[in-house]
Image (cartoon, rainbow, N blue to C red):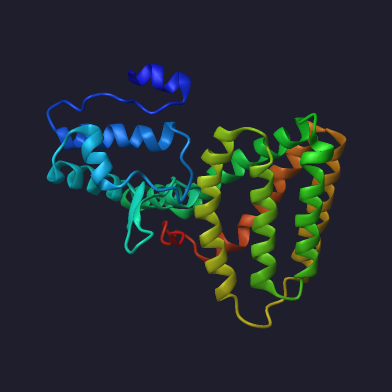
Amino acid sequence: MDAEAAARTGQPRRMPVRGVSVAEGLADVLRDRILDGGMHDGDLLPKQSELLDEYKVGKTTLRQAIRILETEGLVTVRRGNTGGLAVQLPSETDAARTFGLVLRSRRVPLEDLAAAVRNLEPTCAAMCAARTDRDTEVVPQLRALHERCVELVGDLPAFVRACREFHEGLVRLCGNTTMQLLLGTAETLWTVHEHDWADAVPVGSDFTDRIKSGLDVHRELVDLIAAGDVDATHALSRQHVEYAQSHPLEARPGMGIASLPDR
């Protein structure tokens, strides 16, 4: 089965491994097997003895192929009686770490990341409002995230984390997987920096007015989404994100991308 046919059927490629590097070719086949073969996080690939028999390669070649997949973060070797080659599917956190490393290598300022988020998140919020199933699939979850923010008003770091979950919810519930992953990666990276700021705020700092204003906007956003008002949702979301970002940015002017999400 060739690669195109495998993609259509959802089945992994079954072919002799050839090419300049047999190990790289085998890694390609095993990568297809993981990503296109319906495997899930934590699933085990066949035992190494079975892979050697199936693909007719030597032990050194198989070890090299496995090392490639380990470097990519797609598999990890488990030890013990129940061990083997365990699948690790890529996550937004993995993407955010790589994205953050690229931004750091280019000396990108935090403001640049913030600008991307405040331009893209309102689009996701508007997409939430445009969903025909928003009454059942979007609004109840956003209201629950908002109530969580209300419960944590007295604890600034926890409140900030809950608010980030609300904002991430707008992205996660937009209904478009590409936007979820694209913006979700940027949101994850921004979230780490916002958490760093919240954790460093001196005890006793008064954000009462900003907190009340933020909660009012969250409530209004959910109401606009429930009403299906796409344009008003986009406009209010843009205004709110810019306002919410102002404190972390003002506290660290000119700062570059510094923090990365935990693995």
Q: Quadrant of residue 51?
A: top left
- How far across and down, in percent of the image, does residue 188 sit? 53, 53
Left-right relation of 94 to 151: left
Nearest to the observer: residue 258 or residue 92 = 92
Q: Quadrant of residue 83?
A: bottom left
Nearest to the observer: residue 87 or residue 200 = 87
The residue sitting at 75% across, 64% down in the picture is 210
Q: Is residue 14 above or below residue 210?
A: above
Nearest to the observer: residue 228 or residue 47 = 47
- How far across and down, in percent of the image, does residue 35 sit? 42, 36
Question: Which quarter of the figure is the C terminus placed in?
Answer: bottom left
The residue sitting at 43% across, 62% down in the picture is 259
The residue sitting at 32% across, 62% down in the picture is 79
- How far across and down, in percent of the image, does residue 102 sit? 35, 47
- How far across and down, in percent of the image, does residue 235 sit? 74, 38
Residue found at the very far bottom of the displayed protein: 203
The residue sitting at 29% across, 32% down in the picture is 29
Regarding residue 32, the answer to whether it shows in the image is: yes
Q: Is residue 87 above or below residue 22?
A: below
Regarding residue 225, the answer to whether it shows in the image is: no
